[in-house]
Amino acid sequence: MDIQNAQKAVDKWIQNHGVRYFNELTNMAQLTEEVGEVARIIARRYGEQSEKASDKSKDLGEELADVVFVVLCLANQTGIDLQAAFDRKLDIKTKRDHDRHHDNEKLK
């Protein structure tokens, strides 16, 4: 599924299962919470913190999907075509960063 269709799927889900979109500030807080859950898993599973027994069953993919869902909600409710924005950003990064990291000794 491309981003445009994902936005449509989220909007359809909101219409069929939700009452309405949470307001933008609530969704921003929700996004922060979801990113925090991703950070917790990464810090404990791949970083140096010890993973608690209660964290071992958490699914990183599911938590990343929660982040994507809220981002898509924010894009929908603010009128952003996220597919077009992503395509533009990828083009900018491609032109700007094509050779940027090739000589970075830290990455070798």
Image (cartoon, helix red, strand yellow):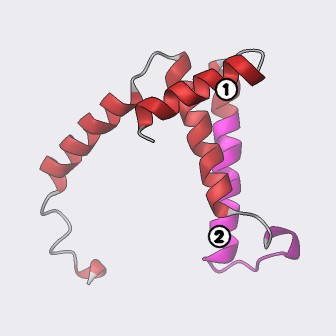
Q: Quadrant of the N terminus?
A: top left
Pick whichever, 65 or 6, lies toward us.
6
The picture quadrant where one finds residue 87 is top left
The type of residue carrying mark 1 is Trp
Circle 1 packing at 10 Å, graded few (<14), some (14-19), many (20+), is few
**For this view, does 88 lie left or right of residue 9?**
left
Residue 22 visible, this angle: no
Q: Is residue 42 magenta?
A: yes
The picture quadrant where one finds residue 81 is top left
- The CA span between labels 1 and 2 is 32 Å
The residue that appears at 22% across and 48% down in the rendered structure is 93
Which residue in the rendered view is the most extreme toward the right?
Answer: 54
Question: Which residue in the structure is indicated by mark 1?
Answer: 13
Q: Is residue 37 above or below residue 74?
A: below
The residue that appears at 57% across and 29% down in the rendered structure is 9
The residue that appears at 33% across and 37% down in the rendered structure is 86
Q: Is residue 66 above or below residue 97?
A: above
- Residues rendered magenta in the picture: 30-55
Q: Secondary structure at mark 2?
A: helix
**For this view, does 99 lie left or right of residue 16?**
left
The type of residue carrying mark 2 is Ala
In the rendered image, residue 95, in percent from the top left (x then y), is placed at: 13, 48
Q: Quadrant of the C terminus?
A: bottom left
Question: Which residue in the structure is indicated by mark 2?
Answer: 43
